[in-house]
Amino acid sequence: EKAKALEAQQKAALKAEKLRKKNSDNPADWGRVRQYQHLYKTTAEVDPKLNLWLAGGALAGVALALLLGLPFAMHWAIVVLFALTFAVMAVLLVLVWRAKKGAFTRYKGQPGSAEVAMSMLNKKKYTYTSAVAFNREMDMVHRVVGPCGVVLIGEGTQPARLRAMLGAEAKRHERVLYGIPVTSLVMGDGQGQTPLADLQKAIEKLPKTVQPAQQTAIQLKLKTLDSSRPKVPLPKGPLPNVKGANRAMRGR
C-alpha cells in the first residue's frame, strides 16, 4: 500500500509539473516547437520580411543538398532527405538571426533596452546587473562582469549628462576594484556611441584580462558597493528568448 501510495504521489507530481510547464509564461519551460512558434510570432510582428527570409533559407538548404547530391549520383531518396534536413536547419538559423534583429527593433528606445543585448551574452562567462545607477530622467548605468573585467554601459537621452554620470560611476568602481579594468560604453546611435544592435559584440570583443576566479572576487566586492543603492523601477515584460532558441537547436 505504501508503494502504491508513493507511485501515485510521483505520478501526481509529474502531472502537476507538466501542467505547470504547459501554462508557464517562461520560455525555458516550453518545448522546442513552442519556443520556435513563439519566436516566429514575436519576430513577425516587427519584421514584415520574415517569411521571405525563411523561404530564402529553405531554398538555400535545398540548393546545397542538390549541389552535394547530384555530382556524386546519390539516390534520389537520399537527396530528398538531405534537402529536407538542410532546409529545416537553414530556416531555424535564419529565424534565430532575424529574431535577434527583431528584438533590437522592438525594444530600441525603451528605458532599460540595453538588457536585451546583455541577456544575449554567454551566461557562463558574463553576468550583468541592470541599472546600478540612475536618475529621475531615466538615464541609467548598467554593469557587465566578465573576462574583460567590468563594463559600465550608459543609457540615456542626454549624452553630456550621461557621460558625467558614467564617469562618476567608473571612479566609484575603480576605487573598489583595485586595478581591475573598468570600461565605459555609451549606448546610442551618435558619434562615439555603441548602437544597441552592436552592444553584445562590442562587449565580447574587449580584451580578455580577468580569470574566472577573479570574477568571483569582483562580484563579492560589488555586492558591498551595491548594498546601499536603491532599485530602479524598470519596465517589466518578457525579453526575447533567443538564447533558449539557440540551445534548442543544439539539443538539450
Image (cartoon, helix red, strand yellow):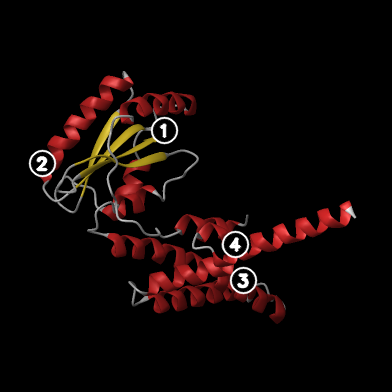
**Which type of secondary structure does the marked residue at label 3 adopt?**
helix
| Vertical position of residue 101 compared to residue 45: above or below | above
Report, in whole angstroms, how far the alpha carbon at label 2 lies from the one at label 1: 29 Å
Percent of width and height locating residue 226:
32, 31
Report, in whole angstroms, how far the alpha carbon at label 1 lies from the one at label 3: 37 Å
Q: Which residue is mark 4?
A: 20
Mark 1 or 4, nearer chain start: 4
| Vertical position of residue 241 compared to residue 199: above or below | below
Amino acid type shown at disc 2: Arg
Closer to us: 204 or 102: 102
**Which type of secondary structure does the marked residue at label 2 adopt?**
helix
Q: Which residue is mark 1?
A: 147
Q: Residue at x 33, y 29 (%)?
A: 227
Amino acid type shown at disc 1: Pro
- Whether pointer 2 and pointer 3 mark residues with C-beta atoms closer than 8 Å, the reply is no
Q: Where, by quadrant of the figure, is residue 5 drawn?
A: bottom right
**Which type of secondary structure does the marked residue at label 1 adopt?**
loop
- Nearer the viewer's eye, disc 1 or disc 3? 1
Indicate which disc residue 85 carries. Answer: 3
Q: Residue at x 35, y 65 (%)?
A: 102
**Which type of secondary structure does the marked residue at label 4 adopt?**
helix
- Whether pointer 4 and pointer 3 mark residues with C-beta atoms closer than 8 Å, the reply is no
